[in-house]
Image (cartoon, helix red, strand yellow):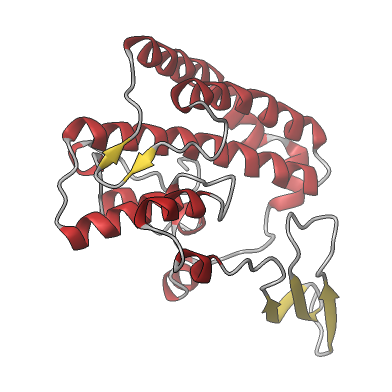
Amino acid sequence: MKSDITYPLNIGPVHPAFKEPIKFTFRIEGEKVVWADIDFGYTHRAIERIAQERNYIQIIYLLERVCGICSFSHPMAYCLAIEDVAGIEVPPRARYIRTIVGELERLHSHLLWTGVAAHEIGFDTLFMYTWNIREKVLDCLEELTGNRINYAMLTIGGVRRDITVDNAQTIHQVLEYYEELYNRTSEILLDDLTLRARTEGVGILTIEQAERLCAVGPTARGSGLMKDVRVDYPVNAYYEIPWLKPVSPRDI
């Protein structure tokens, strides 16, 4: 739909689709957003200021609470920074344990947001399906760390827990479980008529726009931009592992 007339659309700071308060002011031309203003800060907790009153180890647990969904990645970045500044070498086994826990968290995070996206377009069957299969990896993380989120697994220079033989068997079982579900899940996500009707042609981000806006992760790869921080800037054990970058349209 084309139009020479634009109109403002305010959404938030409280909205059923939002997981946390945030305010958007859009200017709409027909069905296209031509301008947007984003107002963050409604849940700002001054973590940076609080960290000034904590020691180096206490900050790790503080940063875990930046986001419960990705409670490993924030303290991981902090530990890597401290280790780099202090010249601390992390033992190989600890590097691999960090990588394993990070990838398990990535699984649960992607499944969570896939479910949320399905819920927002009214596809609650997919929402319940993805959240149900997500429980498997959360149970695995709980066995490894003692917690489903906020794992308290990291410390400067290494990790706080080892992975036992029994833990390793659990990890293999979880990976086999998801491998068995892969074809069914990908068929739903890529070919289901309901999902395609609600998403195709919506929110297009071209490869040029993605590169100009410095998009990363699945957002960048969804636009066909071959970016993966695990390959481009490897840390922990990532640089020792062969990777094949997943790129759109069907390989994400």
At 30% from the left and 40% from the top, the residue drawn is 244
Residue 103 seen in the figure: yes
- On the image, the x and y values in percent for residue 177 come to 51, 16
**Residue 190 or 37: which is nearer the viewer?**
37
181 shown above or below 237: above
Q: Is residue 228 visible?
A: no
Residue at 35% over, 28% down: 161
The structure residue drawn at horizontal position 27% and vertical position 58%, both measured from the top left corner, is 82
User: In what quadrant of the picture does the N terminus appear?
Assistant: bottom right
Q: Position of residue 250 (x, y in %)?
A: 50, 41
Image location of residue 122, percent across then percent down = 84, 43
Number of numbered discs visible in the structure rendering = 0
Q: Residue at left 44%, top 23%? A: 144
| Residue 118 appears left or right of 204 | right
Q: Quadrant of residue 72?
A: top left
- Residue 162 lies, in percent from the top left, at 32, 24
* 181 relative to 245, above or below: above
Q: Is residue 92 left or right of residue 230?
A: left
As drawn, is 4 to the left or to the right of 157? right
Residue 155: image quadrant is top left
